[in-house]
Amino acid sequence: MKRVEIELSGVKVRAVLYEDKAPVTVAAFWKCLPYEDRVTHAKWSGQMFHTNTDFKVAIDTSQWSLGVENPVGFQAPGDIVYLPGAKEIAISYGEARFSWVIGPMYVTALGRIEGDLTEFAKKADRLQWDGAGKFTIRPLADA
Amino acid sequence: MKPIVIEFDGHTVRGGLLDDLAPEICSRIWQALPLEGQTTNTVWSGDMLRLWVEIPEPERLENAVQLHHPGDILFIPRWNGLRFVYGQARMQGPSGGATVPRVGRIEGDIGPLAEFGRKIEWEGARLMRVKRG
């Protein structure tokens, strides 16, 4: 099972990736790690933030009827989602639904944060007040 | 239309309150001026800024609209403060779009406001001041 460590503005959490439900996307994502970026708060999706530097992956999305693998239309706190068209991931820390100008969008459920989200959520919420935050994803054991 | 001046980040833009279309709300805003507070982007509504100030709540909705245009100034009952539209935006929350009062318009180029919105996204909240024009 693939796991990652996610760090946002100095707060670290661990997450599991859905290798069984989204094998193509997770495999492509895994090759991009470690990944560093400055993330910004969502403007359309509620309590969620997103990356701004493209993940350098090339996924053939035509193989899925909705254009994404393991599609979801709602997110719970701690959910990690991927939007192939924008090559970005987004992480929910509260009440959120991935959306853009025309409304909610299907995204790939890529994984979820495990354990207590409290301190991570506080840092995520500060993004709307403090601006972009430092964000890192590091690979952990693949077992 | 009651003239107002909006100052932020070294910029000054002019606008007006639509007191002919939303007389009660605009009167409450006018009486509350000058207003100064922190400004952030909204988290559900797109290219829209929220000025975090307190304005006495109106008795009823006036000039309520569902779609907004760049340059619109909105007042959101129960969520208070003023909203400034600087691009593609729609006042909404988790349950979808909201019908809200359009209480004013910014005149002329809104480029500086859009630049302000993007700057806040990356650098954090900034002060905005609204006063009588």
Image (cartoon, rainbow, N blue to C red):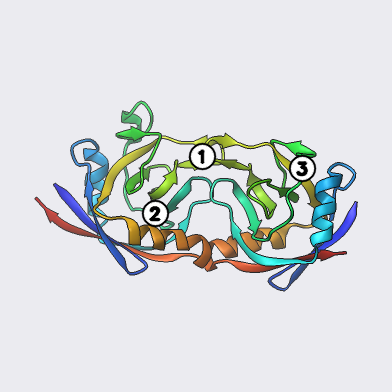
Mark 2 crowdedness (10 Å alpha carbons): few <14, some 14-19, many ≥20: few
Q: Nearer the viewer, residue B26 or A123?
A: B26
- Mark 1 or 3: the one toward you: 3
Q: In x, y percent, where is residue B93?
A: 55, 41
> Do circles 1 and 2 both sit on a common chain?
no
Task: Return the residue at label 3.
Answer: B59
Compared with residue B99, is residue A141 higher up or lower down, i.e. above or below?
A: below
Task: Return the residue at label 1.
Answer: B94
Q: In x, y percent, where is residue B15?
A: 83, 57
> Do circles 1 and 3 both sit on a common chain?
yes
Tag shown at residue A61? none
Secondary structure under the numbered disc 2 in the rendered image: loop
Amino acid type, mark 2 = Asp
Quarter of the rendering containing residue A53: bottom left
Disc 1 from disc 3: Cα separation: 25 Å
Secondary structure under the numbered disc 3 in the rendered image: loop
Compared with residue B1, is residue A137 higher up or lower down, i.e. above or below?
A: below
Which quadrant of the rendered structure holds the C terminus of chain B? bottom right
Residue at (67, 66) in percent of width and height: B37
Task: Decide if residue A40 is in sight here.
Answer: yes
Task: Return the residue at label 2.
Answer: A54
Judge left or right: residue A59 versus residue A43: left
Q: In x, y percent, where is residue A70?
A: 30, 34
